[in-house]
Amino acid sequence: MGLLKIILIILLVYYGFKVLSRLFAPLLVRFVAKKAEEKFGGQFGGFQNPNQQREQQKQKEGETVIDKMPNTKRSSKEKVGEYIDYEEID
């Protein structure tokens, strides 16, 4: 009798999980797709969120905006190597 109870509980859980997954899987897929769209849309300049649209509207056409100043501490005086003259031999 105990073995039969265990088998029935396992079958009930299995079919219950199947029914619930059919109900909630589309919602989960939509949620994941929406999150992926937000993530990739920001990277590729696709759809913008409302905050980005407001910032873009504040800028006038033809106006130049610098978001980040370049690092000015670079120096090209670093010695990379030595220049060696060479002759072509025919």
Image (cartoon, grey):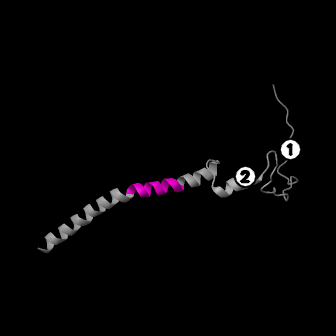
Q: Main secondary structure of the magenta part?
A: helix
Q: Which residue is label 2 attached to?
A: 56
- Which contiguous range is marked in magenta? 25-35
Q: Which is more foreground, mark 1 or mark 2?
A: 2
Q: Position of residue 62 (x, y in %)?
A: 81, 45
Q: Residue at x 58, y 51 (%)?
A: 40
Looking at the rendered structure, the kind of residue marked 1 is: Tyr
Q: Residue furthest top?
A: 90
Instruction: Residue 52: give x, y in percent of width and height.
Output: 68, 55
Residue 73, given in percent of the width and then of the height, sits at 85, 59
Query: Residue farthest to the bottom?
Result: 2
Residue in view at x 38 percent, y 56 percent: 25
Alpha-carbon neighbours of circle 2 within 10 Å: few (<14), some, or many (≥20)? few
Looking at the picture, does residue 79 appear above or below residue 85?
below
Q: Quadrant of residue 21?
A: bottom left
**In the image, what residue type sits under mark 2?**
Gln
Depth check: 61 or 8 in front? 61
Residue closer to the observer: 39 or 27: 27
Q: Is residue 9 magenta?
A: no
Tell me the CA gap for discs 1 and 2: 49 Å
- The answer to whether residue 68 is left or right of residue 19 is right
Residue 54 is left or right of residue 31, and the answer is right
**Disc assigned to residue 17:** none
Q: Secondary structure at mark 2?
A: helix
Task: Name the residue carrying label 1.
Answer: 83
Query: Any magenta on residue 30?
Result: yes
Q: Earlier in the sequence, mark 1 or mark 2?
A: 2
